[in-house]
Image (tube, rainbow, N blue to C red):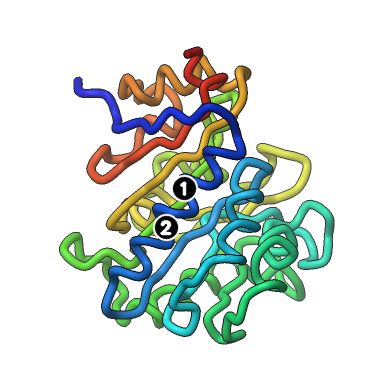
Amino acid sequence: MKELQTDVLKDPETLAQSAAEWLAAAAKASQDRFVVALSGGSTPKRMYQILAGMDLPWRRTHWFWGDERFVPPDDALSNYRMVREALFAHASIPAENIHPVPTQGLEPEAAAAAYEAELKRFYGSDRLDPTRPLFDITLLGLGPDGHTASLFPGTAVLAERHKWVAAVIGAKDEARITFTYPLLESSRHIAFLVAGAEKQRMLGLLRGGDTGIPAGRLAKEHVRVFADSAATGR
């Protein structure tokens, strides 16, 4: 099997800069609204900080989250809070273009259903059309156990092919809300951002197409990897 396209950067800073420039170029080249699914974690945070200082078409760019911890939006563990502080607080982004996962006033399953309903309204259909991806770019991380978004090894959500969004309870201390594979794959481009020597083994499995890890089960079309030299072992 052909390995995934991989950009090997010397360090996390160069990785963040390269990924930010790639996303910005894609946004500027688009003619219509530009839709991004965001990732949490420390690796993309620096990318978001760099994006905040770039000239993007902010008024036609929309932001969703591929997964979220089920915590209040001001909680230190919140992916929304991280992106808000790194990006949204420093750029002229219309509030209506920001689409956080609802995490207050309802249970996780209801939150997942509400987010799915919002995504369907935004997309304009209850069914995903392979010829019309919902997202232009989906950003993903790679966990040391091979998870991506909140698709953890051994969880029932890995087999979900009907729901767009699902609650994941019991895999971690806090519940999670995550995109399922069908929604993650409804993207023109998917980019994994991977940094650190502790990711070496899983990155090797991902690049080799190993479906034994959750990240390796994504359809391989349009998938790209931005990795630092530590993660690739180079």
125 relative to 212 in the view: left or right = left
Q: Could you say where residue 139 lies in the image, as x and y percent from the top left?
A: 47, 50
**Residue at image x 58%, y 30%?**
11
Q: Position of residue 14 (x, y in %)?
A: 55, 38
- Relative placement, left or right, of 139 versus 39 is left
Is residue 154 something that shows in the picture? Answer: no
The Cα atoms of the two marked residues, 1 and 2, are separated by 6 Å
Quadrant containing the N terminus in the rendered view? top left
Q: Residue at x 72, y 73 (%)?
A: 89
- Provide the secondary structure element on which disc 2 rests: helix
Question: Is residue 200 shown to the viewer in this render?
Answer: yes
What amino acid type is highlighted by mark number 1? Ala
227 with respect to 130 (left or right): right
Helix, strand or loop at label 1? It is helix
Specify the quadrant of the image occupied by residue 195. Answer: top right
In the image: residue 218, left or right of residue 112: left
Horizontal and vertical percent position of residue 150:
57, 44
Q: Residue at x 52, y 38 (%)?
A: 15
Q: Residue furthest right?
A: 75
| Residue type of the residue flagged with mark 2 | Leu
Density class for disc 1 (Cα within 10 Å; few <14, some 14-19, many ≥20) is many
Q: Looking at the image, is 197 positioned above or below residue 41?
A: above
On residue 23, the disc is 2
What is the tally of numbered marks visible in this picture? 2
Q: Residue at x 60, y 35 (%)?
A: 12
Q: Choose between 232 and 96: the one closer to the eye.
A: 232
Question: What residue did someone put label 1 on?
Answer: 19
Q: Please tell me how crowded label 2 is: few (under 14), some (14-19), or many (20+) other residues with Cα within 10 Å.
A: many
Q: Nearer the viewer, residue 37 or 85?
A: 85
| The disc label shown at residue 99, or none | none
Q: Are marks 1 and 2 in contact (CB under 8 Å)?
A: yes
